[in-house]
């Protein structure tokens, strides 16, 4: 198993290229470019959702990427209250205010799980890399 943990907040995200860090981790693990694209896109959507919808204002998050058992597992933990949002069955219209990120995550990832945690909300995404 190979993992990386990144502690995020608004100031870290403003100064740091999260995409490059995730990309480097996946390159070191020989993950294909199409799978890297899906994972980076879904992580950015998830982080943006926390920043836009978290009601605690600070948007402190912990991002953990794991490569194990021929899959990449992404854990995103934040201190916000769990919002129960269902993913749209179809891609929302271009003029829709929200929903595209959830649709992308549920369409591109093998598994998407959101649950309440002791500290707030835990999102887990997984994608097979076989």
Image: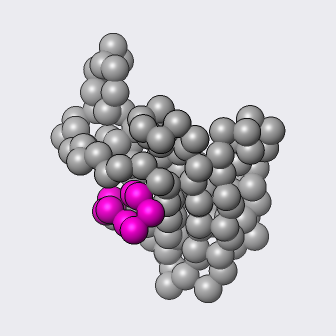
Q: Is residue 109 above or below residue 48?
A: below
Find the magenta span and give its range: 112-121
Most foreground residue, 56 or 71 = 56
- Between 129 and 54, which is closer to the camera in this rendering? 54
Residue at (67% x, 58% y) in the render: 7
Residue 39 at x, y = what percent?
Answer: 54, 54
Residue 5 lies left or right of residue 128; in this view the side is right
Q: At 29% from the left edge and 46% from the top edge, which residue is drawn?
A: 83
- Residue positioned 37% across, 66% down in the render: 117
Nearest the viewer among 121 and 43 is 121
Looking at the image, residue 40 sits to the left or right of residue 118; the answer is right
Task: Note whether 34 is above or below 52 in the view shown.
Answer: below
- Residue placed furthest toward the right: 15
Q: Nearer the viewer, residue 10 or 17?
A: 10
Residue 41's spot in the image, x, y percent?
54, 44
At horizontal 68% and vertical 70% (from top left) the residue drawn is: 4
């Amino acid at each position: 198993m190979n993992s990386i943990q990144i502690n995020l907040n608004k100031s870290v995200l403003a100064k740091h290229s999260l995409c490059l860090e995730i990309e480097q981790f996946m390159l070191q693990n020989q993950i294909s470019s199409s799978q890297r694209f899906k994972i980076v896109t879904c992580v950015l959507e998830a982080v943006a959702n926390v920043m836009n919808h978290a009601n605690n204002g600070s948007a402190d998050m912990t991002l953990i990427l794991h490569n194990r058992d021929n899959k990449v597992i992404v854990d995103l933990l934040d201190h916000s209250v769990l919002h129960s949002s269902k993913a749209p069955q179809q891609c929302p219209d271009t003029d829709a205010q929200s929903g595209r990120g959830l649709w992308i995550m549920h369409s591109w990832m093998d598994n998407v799980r959101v649950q309440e945690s002791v500290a707030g909300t835990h999102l887990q995404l997984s994608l097979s890399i076989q």
